[in-house]
Image (tube, helix red, strand yellow):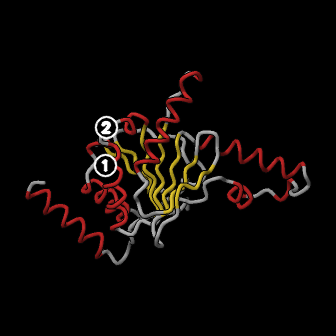
Amino acid sequence: MGLFSRLYQIRLERGILKDDKASPPSSIVLVLTESDLLDADFSRRLIEFIKWCQEYNINVLTIYISLIDMDLDISGRIYNELQMKITDSLKDVDATINLFTIDGREHYLKTADSRGMLINLSLGYGGKKELTETFKDIMSKIDSGELTPGEIDESVIENNLLIKHEPDLVIRSGGKRLADFLIWQSVYSEMYFTDMSWMNFRKIDLLRAIRDFQKRQRRFGK
């Protein structure tokens, strides 16, 4: 890192830590693609990003990896390889890690040795699929008499979502379009787009995102 970049990073760090009016985000979503995951340097970069988040007390990190539609004959094999790679990448991370697979199943990969970060991993399980399954579950409860149609409200829907966390900040690197991930949960989240590709994403870029978040006036739909 050059001198000016280092000085700028120090300035960002001080601004984040000394801002008495706005705290850093406690929950972040990072949106990636399968091409990011296939990069040879992916594991190292992901571990770095997690450590950066831990430095700034980000308690919940949700990583969404969007997957292109593939032929069914090859999608299973490729998907299993991707799942094994990302699982192996995080085996030494001190965090509680949950994996949400493309078929809407939750797998508890590990529990942190100490109280710390929760990492949610979603491999291709987008918001459309999640909401579809949520409404199916609610309809099933209506059929069984557990619920009546009049009892359905926002809290009922939220309680039936697979992923419960509402992120403060969604980071999309290397693109200008959002994935459909966490359609319901991220409705009041702050969005941060950067042209910087994931494999070139640096600590200073995360600090920029955090500082930008602190400077925004969040209205939560009001």
Q: Is residue 131 above or below residue 55?
A: above
- At 27% across and 53% down in the image, what residue appears? 205
CB atoms of marks 1 and 2 within 8 Å = no
In the rendered image, residue 170, in percent from the top left (x then y), is placed at 44, 52
Of residues 222 and 1, which is closer to you in this image?
A: 1
Q: Residues within 10 Å of mark 1 (few under 14, many from 20)?
A: few
Instruction: Please identify the quadrant where the C terminus is shown.
Output: bottom right
Image mark for residue 69: none
The amino acid beneath tag 1 is: Arg
In percent of the image, x 64 and y 44: which residue is there?
104
Numbered badge on residue 40: 2
Specify the amino acid type for callout 2. Answer: Ala
Q: On the picture, is 174 further left or further right than 87? A: left
Q: Residue at x 71, y 61 (%)?
A: 155
Mark 2 burial class by Cα count in 10 Å: few <14, some 14-19, many 20+: few
Q: Is residue 195 visible?
A: no
Specify the farthest residue to the left.
3
CA–CA distance in space, label 1 to label 2: 9 Å
Q: Is residue 63 left or right of residue 12?
A: right
- Nearest the camera: 173 or 1? 1
* Residue 43, horizontal then vertical, whole percent: 35, 46
